[in-house]
Amino acid sequence: MKKLTVMTSEMEARLFTNHLKAHGLKVVMSGNKEYASIITGQDNGRFEILVSEDDFEEALSLSQKLHLHLEPNHQPTPKIENAFLHYKKSIIFALMSIIILPIIFNISSFYFLYQFIKNQEIKGITKSVLILISLILNISFGLAGLFILYNTFSHVGN
């Protein structure tokens, strides 16, 4: 499979994928919604449209007929970028855990921290410091979020 483009709207990506499938092309949409889209109800994310190498030129032709402007560079996302994307999500979830659903956001934050740790592209002291920062945020904000929830709900019954 070869990356044709990246779309930020899930609806647009699904429509385009179905259009290509309707023309008999082998196509896959991969990706996921951004973490905040669940809360805000938006349709944002990062959705890669992948087509078989045999169908690539025909997919480009069909996209031009639809007047879609595809990414000019069809290179895959570098692994180091993916590592920092996992780290960024880990930090965002840690920050969100102080405000909304501390346990759920801490679990999500730890998941993305784990993905960051597994990535071998970043090594040394930089990685260690970033992991330590994420752990400190997770623990402190998670506890603060639980404290806020406890105080909020302890006054509800009174």
Image (cartoon, rainbow, N blue to C red):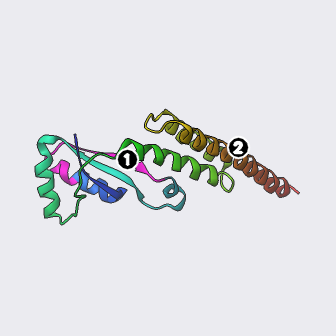
Task: Identify residue type, mark 2.
Answer: Ile
Between 50 and 27, the one lying in front of the other is: 50
Residue 139, disc: 2
Residue 55 occupies quadrant: top left
Q: Is residue 22 magenta?
A: yes
Which residue is labeled 1 in the image?
31
Along the horizontal axis of the image, is 75 left or right of 60? right
Q: Position of residue 13 (x, y in %)?
A: 30, 55
Q: Where the N terminus falls, by quadrant? A: top left
Q: Is residue 70 magenta?
A: no
Q: Position of residue 61 (x, y in %)?
A: 11, 57
Rendered residue at 25%/58% (across/down): 71
Task: Check if mark 1's residue and mark 2's residue have beta carbons within 8 Å.
Answer: no
Rendered residue at 22%/58% (across/down): 72
SS class, disc 2: helix
Residue range of the region highlighted in magenta in the rendering: 19-34
Rendered residue at 76%/52% (across/down): 149
Using the numbered discs, state the Cα–Cα distance from disc 1 to disc 2 in whole angstroms. Answer: 29 Å
Work out whether mark 1 precedes mark 2 in sequence or the reverse, and give the earlier one.
1
Residue 108, disc: none
Task: Identify residue type, mark 1.
Answer: Gly
Q: Where the C terminus falls, by quadrant? A: bottom right
Between 11 and 114, the one lying in front of the other is: 114
Between 80 and 111, the one lying in front of the other is: 80
Q: Position of residue 113 (x, y in %)?
A: 55, 40
**Extreme residue toward the right, this view:** 158
